[in-house]
Image (spheres, rainbow, N blue to C red):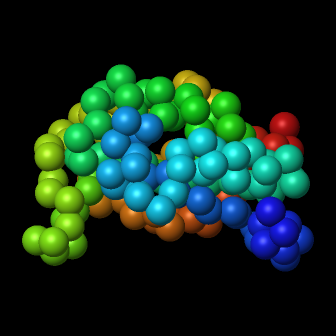
Amino acid sequence: PDLLTEVFESRPEVLAHNVETVPRIFKRIRPAFRYDRSLDVLTQARTFGLVPKSNLILGMGETRDEVSQALRDLHDAGCELITITQYLRPSPRHHPVERWVKPEEFVDLATEAEEIGFAGVMSGPLVRSSYRAGRLYRQAMELRSR
């Protein structure tokens, strides 16, 4: 916690902590991390007055319902910005791609995330975690000033 406070006190414009996947497969994909701890980091960042951001990577074995729940979990934790992208296997030693997400699903997920209440959403097969970060940040600031 002390190290988190040190990061928070440096006042980053956005605190990015990428959850990347859903609870059911989280340990397999991110063995050194815990889903609930990641949500807690985002909550603490929001409580500190920062703009929390996260990322979901699709195609690693999650279901559509699990993605919807993860979006709700992230928003409930205080996450304001979300990027949603396709998993691309970096090498044969890494987790295989279990499915290629259709472009329409990315559009549907963007709409869903906006309806949930995210201030900024980028969703697409080639979106990356920092994709158009400035635009997402401005959207969050505009929403906060209303």
Q: Which quarter of the figure is the C terminus placed in?
A: top right
Relative placement, left or right, of 54 versus 139 is left
At 58% across and 32% down in the image, what residue appears?
73
Question: Is residue 24 or residue 110 the one in the foreground?
Answer: 24
Q: Is residue 131 visible?
A: yes
Report which quarter residue 108 is drawn in.
top left
Q: Which quarter of the figure is the N terminus placed in?
A: bottom right
Above or below 120: residue 2: below
User: Which percent across, then down, holds residue 52?
Assistant: 69, 53
Relative placement, left or right, of 67 versus 78 is left
Relative placement, left or right, of 84 versus 47 is left
Q: Is residue 85 visible?
A: no
User: Which percent across, then down, holds residue 63?
Assistant: 28, 30
Outermost residue to the left: 92
User: Which percent across, then down, holds residue 17?
Assistant: 59, 59
Report which quarter residue 143 is drawn in.
top right
User: Which percent across, then down, holds residue 76?
Assistant: 67, 31
